[in-house]
């Protein structure tokens, strides 16, 4: 038996980093993220922040679609709720003259709770219908959310099509008014989200989600309440997307309704499929690909065509085709995503030089 | 322990069960037999709460559970296995078995998010308990990390039994536990079922086609045919019951 | 009262087009058990094909003009007063070759597109999980939308109506009712195609093969039904009807990328009616058409775009499998 994975205690066997290379990878990643703001230029900070926000949102989609098996095509709507929620709550807190240094501590959880609450509402159909019906229900919900945000009657609150400006968050007086400072917040949140959600899947809660994905009636027979766990999954998922939205609003300091439309929902799904559904590292890898893809395209087009008008014109459509092709390609050739590829690599490293593959 | 009272079930015009009544005594193995399409699995689905009978009651430990959802029945200590294995194919053997313990654990969402602390303690205790009580007992220690899809049929059936046992059920319902198994595997499974009954004092309800096994291990047998209950009694009584012989061999012309 | 009638008939006219689009989604679902999330984008492609063959090509230097302009038509046209029914008929007659060529070419092009999608993206996944196939159609949304913007960079444009477009005015209960002839004709075309195809699927051997394949692919395959062929047929059927619907929509609303989004509201309608029931979907399409017209009348045009989505959420909560969809009995 080749395993390279010998353990003396159950505690050791239950560890997640059950392999020295994985441990090294995680700590290396953390060290890189911590040193990053001191060495990177503004462009790299921008990319890293987009990446961090994307990771948080995709983790949310992963909980629902990857682990619980409920397809959602409307998570852009929850991101919108987080972004608008945090912006509007900030305005409200200022009106109530809450000290600025405390505002984010109220606004972020409140925006997440708001997203989770609406997630519960949207999740209600999941109790009665599965699969496609749910995908359409979430899609419909996201269209309705964007519609309400753009609605003239609500424009005094949401800014309508013109959007809103978000205040710079201040943590006990430390005002995050540069992107480099917001990076710290985003990186911390991204790490925390990935870790906390990973923890879920070491316990009965996460196992229940997976069981529902695999065979819901069997899960029910074993005592998993479908009602409770499906809704919990929806709430967690929406809360993560709400957090992503809040970070988004802080980072860009401006929210516009069209940023959260179908394209965002599709990007989230694409990131998940590419990274690996139902895997901890799925969102981490997938978001990286989705964030880097446009930059990569920009560079390639720039090299091939120079900065011509044509190059600028075909960039957006090319990007769209590329996202679609990523989903299709991974579903057809590596349905378990990059997480599966990385697993193979880690396994091979661990066994080397005794076995390969 | 389990009492079924005059259960009727129909799908549109098809009458799947017509007046089934029997009792399964505590700590004993009760067999349900009958030709294909007799309504055995339908009966199980009524017992575990998938189908709602049109009339009749199901009583466990004196409590009427007819209106309860499947997951609420699990919390009362009813476990079952399925005719065509219903394991979670994307999970490892160990995770499947752990899921069987769902109702016994207390970790809530917040402690699960933290993990370190109460959740970790509970998980490690669970792991130790499962290893000793289930995995060792059913001799599946060599496959605990294997994905379900990699296992042969007989082992999958055994894992399903393990998952049901993990719940520490009071009532264990086995739907054709040895269907499609060879003699050796059947003998193994029969031994496991007897061991379960002896060691944990579990009440077992068993649907099976393998007549030898049923006659050997059951203390009481209920016979169904076309949704009707045509006999019940000890294995000897059933073997000599003319209605049962007719149902299985066809009526003499 | 007359106003109600006006909005009801407007609603029925757009409902019929919804039904025609929905037909494609239901047909693909019935044959392959895949809900095609990209159907709206297939329709968008159909509309752009029609635009290319009926407008762009005839306008180019090297391609025949494709107008029917004998002398008598020119004189008659010159004599007919502006906006009169006669003028509408004559201008339709003049454009007829372009319309016919555009429509036929669009149907062929859309069918080819469907074959490509089916052959290269769907068939390799035959026998895989539905989830995978649905995700592929989700990927197609993005691909088709990008391909469209690569090829057709122009802004919104108008295309000729399939049918003559005289204004029809009459009175009901003393208030005037006003209908565009082309919309009325489109409704008739849509309902006729819908009815013909549903009948064909019920009666013909191909229809039976399709139903068998949807029940159980592997069994149907082993009984000698060519499942890949059934899949291909369903996709071509969906794309061809989609091209007609796309042409109708493009003439009515102008040609623009938002045609793709239109597909999502039809998806909502399909679920409302019940994924596998042609009758249910037809009823749902008509209901939503009328509902939209009423919403437009009472709440204003803004609300129309979310009407189907709100309606589907309500219907799913009350009847999870749609108005007439069959509930799957879970076998354990």
Image (cartoon, coloured by chain):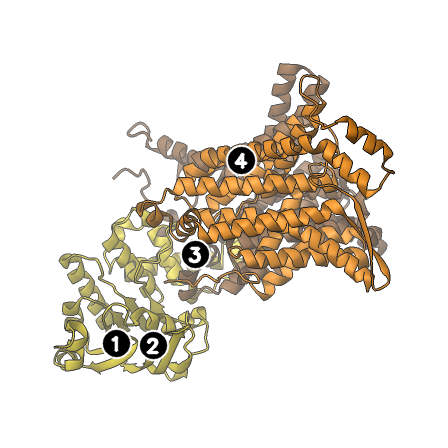
Chain colours: A brown, B yellow, C orange
Judging by the rendered image, the residue that carries numbered circle 3 is A211
Which element is circle 2 on?
strand
How far across and down, in percent of the image, does residue B226 sit? 28, 75
Q: How crowded is mark 2: few (under 14 residues within 10 Å), some or many (20 or more)?
A: many
In the rendered image, residues at marks 1 and 2 fall on the same chain: yes
Please tell me whether mark 3 sits on a helix, a strand or a loop: helix
The local secondary structure at tag 4 comes to helix
How many C-alpha atoms fall within 10 Å of the one at disc 1: few (<14), some, or many (≥20)? many
Q: Identify the image quadrant of residue A31.
A: top right
Label 3 packing within 10 angstroms: few (<14), some (14-19), many (20+): many
Q: Is A103 above or below relative to A334?
A: below
* In front: label 2 or label 3: 2
| Contact flag, marks 2 and 4 (Cβ < 8 Å) | no
Q: Where is residue A25 in the image (x, y as percent from the top left)?
A: 48, 34
Which element type, helix, strand or loop, lies under badge 1?
A: strand
What subunit carries mark 2? B
| Residues at marks 3 and 4, CA–CA distance in whole angstroms | 41 Å
Residue for badge 4: C111
According to the picture, the residue beneath numbered tag 2 turns out to be: B17
Q: Which chain carries label 4?
A: C
Direction from residue A184 to residue B215 in the image, left or right:
left
Real-space Cα distance between discs 2 and 4? 51 Å
Mark 1 vs 2, N-terminal side: 2
Q: Can residue A225 be seen in this view?
A: yes
Q: Quadrant of residue C42?
A: top right
Query: Is residue A243 visible to the viewer in this orientation of the structure?
Result: no
Residue pointed to by mark 1: B224
């Amino acid at each position: 038996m080749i395993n390279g994975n010998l353990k003396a205690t159950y505690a050791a066997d239950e560890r997640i980093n059950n392999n020295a290379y994985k441990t090294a990878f995680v700590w290396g990643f953390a060290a890189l993220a911590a040193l990053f703001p001191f060495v990177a230029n503004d462009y790299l900070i921008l990319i890293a922040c987009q990446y961090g926000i994307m990771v948080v949102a995709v983790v949310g989609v992963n909980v629902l679609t990857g682990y619980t098996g409920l397809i959602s095509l409307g998570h852009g709507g929850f991101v919108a709720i987080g972004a608008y929620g945090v912006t509007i709550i900030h305005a409200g807190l200022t009106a109530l003259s809450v000290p600025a240094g405390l505002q984010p501590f109220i606004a972020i959880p409140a925006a997440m709770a708001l997203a989770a609450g609406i997630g519960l509402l949207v999740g209600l159909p999941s109790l009665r219908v599965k699969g496609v019906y749910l995908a359409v229900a979430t899609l419909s919900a996201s269209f309705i959310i964007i519609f309400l945000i753009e609605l003239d009657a609500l424009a005094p609150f949401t800014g309508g099509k013109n959007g809103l400006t978000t205040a710079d968050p201040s943590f006990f007086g430390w005002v995050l008014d540069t992107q480099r400072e917001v990076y710290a917040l985003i990186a911390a949140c991204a790490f925390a989200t990935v870790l906390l959600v990973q923890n879920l899947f070491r316990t009965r809660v996460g196992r229940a989600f997976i069981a529902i994905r695999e065979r819901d009636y069997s899960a029910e027979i074993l005592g998993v309440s479908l009602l409770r766990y499906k809704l919990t999954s929806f709430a967690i998922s929406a809360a993560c997307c709400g957090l992503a939205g809040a970070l988004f609003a802080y980072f860009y300091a401006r929210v516009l309704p069209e940023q959260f439309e179908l394209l965002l929902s599709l990007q989230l799904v694409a990131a998940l499929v590419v990274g690996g559904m139902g895997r901890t590292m799925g969102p981490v890898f997938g978001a990286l690909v989705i964030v880097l893809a446009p930059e990569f395209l920009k560079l390639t087009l720039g090299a091939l065509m120079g900065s011509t008008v044509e190059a600028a014109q075909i960039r957006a459509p090319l990007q769209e085709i590329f996202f679609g092709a990523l989903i299709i390609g991974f579903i057809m050739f590596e349905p378990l995503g990059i997480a599966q590829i990385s697993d193979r690599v880690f396994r091979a490293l661990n066994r080397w030089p005794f076995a390969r593959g | 322990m389990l009492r079924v009272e005059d259960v009727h079930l129909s799908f549109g015009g098809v009458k799947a069960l017509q007046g089934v009544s029997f009792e399964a005594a505590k700590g004993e193995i009760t067999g349900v037999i009958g030709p294909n399409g007799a309504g055995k699995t339908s009966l199980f689905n009524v017992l575990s709460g998938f189908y709602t009978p049109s009339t009749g009651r199901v009583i466990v430990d004196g409590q009427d559970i007819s209106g309860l959802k499947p997951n609420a029945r699990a919390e009362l200590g009813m476990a079952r296995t399925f005719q065509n294995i219903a394991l979670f194919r994307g999970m490892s053997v160990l995770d499947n078995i752990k899921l069987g313990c769902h109702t016994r654990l207390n970790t809530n969402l917040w402690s699960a998010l933290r993990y370190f602390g109460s959740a970790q303690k509970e998980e490690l205790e669970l792991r130790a308990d499962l290893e000793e009580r289930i995995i060792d007992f059913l001799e599946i220690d060599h496959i605990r990390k294997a994905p379900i899809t990699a296992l042969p049929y007989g082992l999958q059936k055994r894992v399903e039994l393990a998952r049901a046992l993990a719940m520490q059920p009071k009532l264990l319902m086995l739907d054709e536990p040895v269907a499609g198994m060879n003699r050796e595997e059947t003998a193994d499974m029969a031994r496991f079922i007897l061991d379960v009954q002896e060691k944990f004092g579990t009440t077992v309800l068993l649907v099976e086609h393998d007549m030898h096994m049923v006659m050997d291990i059951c203390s009481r047998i209920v016979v169904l045919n076309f949704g009707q209950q045509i006999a019940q009694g000890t294995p000897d009584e059933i073997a000599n019951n003319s209605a049962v012989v007719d149902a299985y061999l066809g009526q003499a012309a | 009262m007359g106003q109600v009638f006006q909005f009801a008939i407007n609603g029925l006219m757009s409902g019929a087009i919804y039904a025609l689009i929905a037909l494609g989604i239901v047909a693909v679902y019935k044959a392959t058990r895949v809900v095609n999330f990209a159907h709206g984008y297939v329709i968008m492609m159909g509309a752009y094909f029609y635009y290319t063959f009926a407008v762009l090509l005839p306008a180019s230097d090297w391609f025949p003009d494709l107008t029917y302009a004998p002398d008598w038509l020119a004189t008659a046209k010159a004599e007919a007063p502006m906006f009169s029914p006669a003028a509408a008929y004559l201008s339709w007659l003049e454009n007829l070759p372009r319309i016919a060529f555009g429509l036929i070419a669009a149907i062929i092009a859309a069918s080819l597109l469907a074959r490509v999608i089916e052959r290269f993206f769907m068939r390799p996944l035959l026998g895989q999980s539905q989830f995978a196939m649905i995700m592929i159609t989700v990927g197609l949304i993005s691909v088709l939308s990008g391909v469209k913007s690569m090829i057709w960079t122009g802004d919104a444009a108008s295309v000729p109506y399939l049918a003559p477009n005289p204004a029809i005015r009459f009175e009901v209960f003393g208030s005037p009712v006003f209908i565009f002839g082309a919309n009325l004709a489109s409704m008739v075309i849509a309902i006729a195609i819908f009815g013909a195809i549903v009948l064909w699927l019920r009666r013909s051997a191909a229809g039976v093969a399709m139903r068998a394949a949807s029940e159980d692919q592997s069994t149907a395959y082993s009984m000698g039904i060519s499942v890949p062929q059934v899949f291909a047929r369903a996709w071509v059927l969906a794309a061809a009807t989609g091209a007609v619907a796309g042409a109708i929509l493009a003439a009515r609303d102008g040609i623009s990328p938002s045609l793709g989004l239109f597909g999502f509201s039809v998806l909502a309608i399909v679920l409302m009616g019940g994924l596998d029931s042609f009758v249910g979907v037809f009823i749902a399409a008509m209901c939503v058409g009328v509902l939209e017209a009423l919403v437009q009348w009472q709440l204003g045009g803004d609300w129309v775009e979310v009407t189907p989505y709100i309606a589907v959420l309500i219907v799913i909560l009350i009847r999870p499998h749609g108005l007439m969809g069959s509930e799957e009995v879970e076998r354990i």
